Image (tube, rainbow, N blue to C red):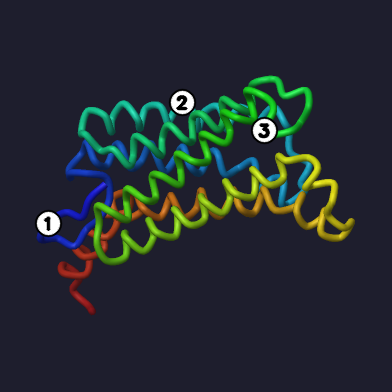
Amino acid sequence: MTETAGTGETGPRGDGSAARATAVSMTAALLATAVAPVVELAGGDVSATAVRLLGLLGAVLAVVSVVLGQRRKDLPTMVLGAGIALGTLSGELPNPSGVVLVSPAGVLFLVAVALVAVAGVLVAARTVRWPRAVGILLAVLGALRLGYLVCIGYTPALLALPQDSLGVALALPAPLALLVLLVAALLFAPVVFAPVGRGVRWLWRTADVR
């Protein structure tokens, strides 16, 4: 993910249809994955099967993004896509204890969260101006989410919390996850919406009345 030289446009490495395909698939993956935390926060009566299927669709699209990114040597997109896909996969594995640090599913989920944070670091290191700011924000949020999961995954520390604090701690995963996914989606917005911007500019230039 780089800044396109001379244009000020940002997005996945490169430009043209390949970059747009990568951006669209990654954005769709992020938004599909974001449905689960949205439903959890809204508390709506939504089919768990539908949410799960959307998550799996997001994972498939994330894998597609990894393949497209690999072809174009776009390391940040590859790392982010891998994190999204592994995060969904971890939810499909059994976790009888429900504790993050003592099950393969929990450890895989921690790896997925760490990969998203690493993607933010890579974006921040390879871009300038506002994409770098978004990358830094993604890295910070990802690191906070990882640290939070490690803390709540340590059962004695979790049980030592006062009742009020315990309620707050258990309510944080959904908003944190949603925030991370939306910030990641911002990285691809310029490429996804570039055709819309060009269309608006063309209409403005060709309009008889301004």
In the figure, residue 16 lies in which quadrant? Answer: top left
- Out of 206 and 148, give the one closest to the viewer: 148
Q: Residue 20 — which label?
A: none
48 sits left or right of 203 in the view: right
Q: Which mark is residue 101?
A: 3
- The percent coordinates of residue 153 (x first, y second) are 71, 40
> Which is more N-terminal, label 1 or label 3?
1
Q: Residues within 10 Å of mark 3 (few under 14, many from 20)?
A: many
Residue at the image point whose x is 56% and y is 28% from the top:
108
**Relative depth, front residue between 145 and 205:** 145
Amino acid type shown at disc 1: Ala
Q: Position of residue 13 (x, y in %)?
A: 22, 44
At label 3, the amino acid type is Leu
What SS does tag 1 mark? loop
The Cα atoms of the two marked residues, 2 and 1, are separated by: 31 Å
Going by the image, does 113 lie left or right of 153? Answer: left
Q: Nearer the viewer, residue 49 or 89?
A: 89
Q: Nearer the viewer, mark 2 or mark 3?
A: 3
Q: Are marks 3 and 1 in contact (CB under 8 Å)?
A: no
Question: What x and y, as percent, mark residue 197?
Answer: 27, 60
* Cα distance between the residues tagged 2 and 3: 26 Å
The kind of residue on which mark 2 rests is Val
The residue indicated by pointer 1 is 5
Q: Using the image, tell me which numbered label, if any, was put on residue 60.
A: 2
Classify mark 3: helix, strand or loop. helix
In the rendered image, the residue lying farthest to the top is: 94
